[in-house]
């Protein structure tokens, strides 16, 4: 069974969004040292129920909150998405030191990510 492991919140003003979520829920943020503006979001202490995520710069008005699902084999899931009425939005891409990621739509048009963990990803 695959589990949701991460969320992304696109924001027109990431600083304002971090202020909102920090004040309302006590979330903490740390700028990711990757190739894009991306703030890792801690929603609570390690070991507590729930997931962490990120706030990122909204690139287009249609950007929505995206949940990412952990999968053991991204290639297998890509094939299952295609066979079962989903639509790939991106090619398989590496997130350095984290894993392999693809974004897709389910048959109802909801966007998700699927990620295979791999610390050797480039």
Image (tube, rainbow, N blue to C red):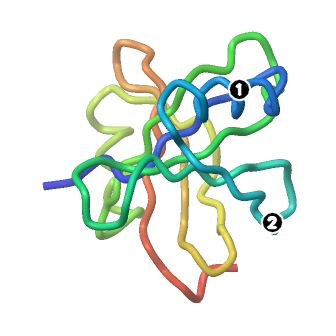
Q: Is residue 31 above or below residue 120?
A: above
Drawn side of residue 14 relative to residue 65, left or right: right
Along the line of sight, which residue is nearer the eye, 11 or 70? 11
Q: Residues within 10 Å of mark 1 (few under 14, many from 20)?
A: some
The answer to whether mark 2 and mark 1 are in CB contact below 8 A is: no
**Sequence order check: which comes first, mark 2 or mark 1?**
1
Q: Please, what secondary structure does the residue beneath circle 2 have?
A: loop
Coordinates of residue 48 in the picture (x, y in percent): 25, 57
Along the line of sight, which residue is nearer the eye, 75 or 60? 60
Q: Residues within 10 Å of mark 2 (few under 14, many from 20)?
A: few
At x 45% / y 46%, what residue is drawn? 43
Along the line of sight, which residue is nearer the eye, 9 or 120? 9
Disc sitting over residue 34 in the figure:
2
Coordinates of residue 60 in the picture (x, y in percent): 81, 18
Inter-mark Cα distance, 2 to 1: 20 Å
Query: Outermost residue, left direction?
Result: 1
Question: What is the quadrant of the C terminus in the image?
Answer: bottom right
At x 81% / y 65%, what residue is drawn? 34
Question: What is the quadrant of the N terminus in the image?
Answer: bottom left
Q: Residue 9, located in which quarter of the rendered image?
A: top right
Q: Please, what secondary structure does the residue beneath circle 1 have?
A: helix
At x 63% / y 81%, what residue is drawn? 97
Q: Is residue 100 above or below residue 25?
A: below
Give the residue number, with chain letter if any, for mark 1: 17
Query: Outermost residue, bottom direction?
Result: 120
Q: Residue 100, located in which quarter of the rendered image?
A: bottom right
């Amino acid at each position: 069974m695959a589990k949701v492991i991460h969320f992304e919140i696109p924001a027109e003003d990431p600083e304002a969004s971090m202020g909102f979520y920090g004040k309302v829920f006590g979330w903490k943020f740390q700028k990711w040292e990757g190739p894009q503006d991306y703030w890792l979001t801690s929603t609570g202490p390690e070991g507590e129920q729930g997931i962490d995520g990120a706030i990122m710069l909204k690139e287009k008005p249609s950007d929505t909150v995206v949940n990412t699902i952990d999968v053991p084999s991204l290639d297998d899931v890509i094939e299952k998405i295609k066979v079962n009425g989903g639509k790939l939005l991106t090619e398989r891409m590496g997130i350095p030191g984290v894993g392999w990621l693809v974004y897709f739509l389910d048959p109802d048009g909801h966007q998700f990510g699927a990620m295979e963990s791999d610390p050797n990803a480039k």
